[in-house]
Image: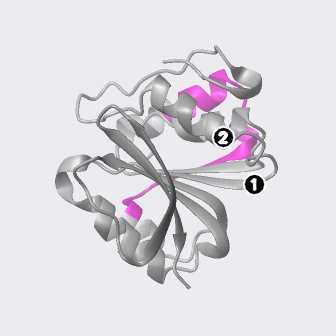
Amino acid sequence: MRVTSGELKGRKIFEVKDKRVRETLDKVRESLFNSLRGEIEGKIFYDLYAGSGAVGIEALSNKAKISIFVDKNIFSIRTINENLKNLKLSDRAKIFRMDVIRFLKTKEYIKGDFIFLDPPYEFDLGEKTLEILNLSNIIKEETIILYEHSKRERVSDNFEIYKSLQIGDTVIDFLRRRI
């Protein structure tokens, strides 16, 4: 895997050495960040269910102020740390080894400008995470949620889809909370 955009384009990203972790593909990240060009700079970016941290690293490569990574898998946390250290990004990152749902129920976070979530497809965590996000204070009025999911999954009625990208079987919906 490689960084696909921004200042670090072409730099290597280590993958998680755990077969249960499904990484966001390079072409999916490239499409996502092409569509966000110029919007990330100076923003707070969350990478939930972070895996290797590739999406949050892409945000940092595109000049996000900070990326906050949340994952409960120890192999993911080690890989995120290794990637951040290798790319000299540790000073612009926070890492939480915690279940995402539990994290969102705590008050340990700052309000995010962008929240990327890519939960494992087979556990219905997407809908649960969106429900908790809707009730949490992590979202500002202008927060954009970037929800990566299988094209067979549906999106919570609490959010409005204002843009969608489809790359093969993968969909990234750009969501805003309904007011």
Is 36 left, or right, of 157 in this rendering? right
Please report the bounds of the magenta region as a residue range. Answer: 80-100
Would you identify the image quadrant in which residue 144 lies?
A: bottom right
Q: CA distance from mark 2 to mark 1?
A: 9 Å
| Label 2 close to label 1 by CB (< 8 Å) | yes
Crowding near pointer 2: few (<14 within 10 Å), some, many (20+)? many
How is the rendered protein coloured? one colour
Circle 2 sits on which residue? 59
**Residue at (36%, 66%) from the top-left corner?**
129
Circle 1 sits on which residue? 43
The amino acid type found where label 2 is placed reads Ala
Would you identify the image quadrant in which residue 126 lies?
A: bottom left
Crowding near pointer 1: few (<14 within 10 Å), some, many (20+)? some
**Residue at (63%, 67%) from the top-left corner?**
143
**Residue at (56%, 77%) from the top-left corner?**
107
In the rendering, at what x and y percent does residue 125 appear? 27, 60
In the rendering, at what x and y percent does residue 101 appear? 37, 67
Whether residue 105 is visible, yes or no, is no
